Amino acid sequence: MKLGLSTCTYTWNFGVANYPQPSHPFTLDVLFDKAFKHHIPVVQILDNIVPLHLFSDSDLYDIRKSADAHCLQLEIGTRGITPHILKQYLHIAEITGSTLVRTIMDGDGAHPSVSEGISWIEEVLPSYEAAGISLAIENHDLRHVAELKELTETIDSPYLGTCIDCVNSLGIQECQAQVIEALLPQAINFHYKDFTIRRTDYDMGFIVQGCVAGQGMTDMDYMIKNRNHSKKNFNLILEQWMPWLGTIEETTALEEQWAEESIRYLQDKFKLLFSN
């Protein structure tokens, strides 16, 4: 298991559509610099923030060169499991040197049944296997974890598995323990973010919001304790749900501060993990 940063560690700093943009938005080189500075070996690039499918092959080679110069292993991510999108991101992974493509079932204008998804993935997976690139399907608020479990268990391949996000499934009324129990055996990637749930001031309803790693409800110890139940070793990628604070300057500054604190927390956890 290795620790990684993501474009989703610094979403506001990259820029969020329909909100004020940062005066100096992050680029991938800025993200690579941060990972290198903190001795973090993995960076995951997701297409909702950096749409790699819009880059030329020449630009993708430049990203690979920059990652290599920063001693980084890349992982990339998209949305959808249609053969078109999976082939497109396999090509991108081969050029950038990524060892993993993360996706979700819904995207690319399609919302397949589990049986359709199995058929689509089986069409493309031999190419992933030949390239030595894994395909990780992430839980989201659009799908019950039982669907992902069925899909990844039906297709018997070490190159297909789940990407566990420890918070996403709250939106479909599935708690963290349910998600980890159902998906950890097939896990090949993990999105870590911490969060809090609190009542509104008027007591009618709850607010789910991100927080600094180790200060919320995500049970890191439970995941670490049970990591050996997964089918293969996986990387843990730090993501953040930073709330909007009213100005882009205040929001981006606190997002960077949260990231610094979260990195320290997770690195301390990793020290304990590998010293035992």
Image (spheres, rainbow, N blue to C red):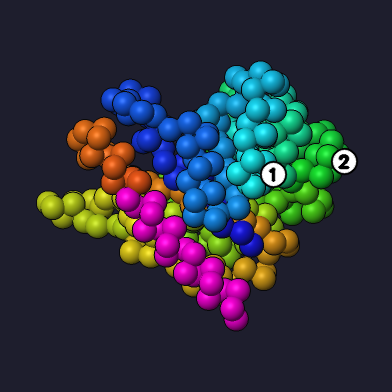
Q: Is residue 237 left or right of residue 158?
A: left
Where disc 1 sits, the SS reads strand
**Residue 16 on the magenta segment:** no
Residue span colored magenta: 257-276
The residue nearer to you, when weighing 219 against 42, is 42
Q: Which residue is mark 1?
A: 100
User: Residue 107 placed where, x, y %?
Assistant: 58, 29
- At 61% from the left and 59% from the top, the residue drawn is 2
Sequence-first disc among 2 and 1: 1
Q: Is residue 239 left or right of residue 189?
A: left
CA distance for labels 2 and 1: 13 Å
Q: Is residue 169 visible?
A: no
- At 64% from the left and 62% from the top, the residue drawn is 1
User: Which residue is situated farthest in the bottom direction here?
Assistant: 276
Where disc 2 sits, the SS reads helix
User: Residue 57 placed where, x, y %?
Assistant: 70, 21
| Number of the label disc, if any, that sits on residue 130 | 2
Q: Determine contact: label 2, label 1, CB under 8 Å.
A: no
- How many numbered circles are shown? 2
| Prevailing secondary structure of the magenta residues | helix
- At 60% from the left and 27% from the top, the residue drawn is 52
The residue nearer to you, when weighing 138 against 102, is 102
- At 43% from the left and 33% from the top, the residue drawn is 26
Quarter of the picture containing the C terminus is bottom right
User: Residue 201 placed where, x, y %?
Assistant: 13, 52
Q: Please identify the quarter of the rendering in which residue 10 is found.
A: top left
Q: Is residue 88 above or below residue 173?
A: above
Q: Is residue 35 visible?
A: yes
Q: Is residue 273 above or below residue 237?
A: below
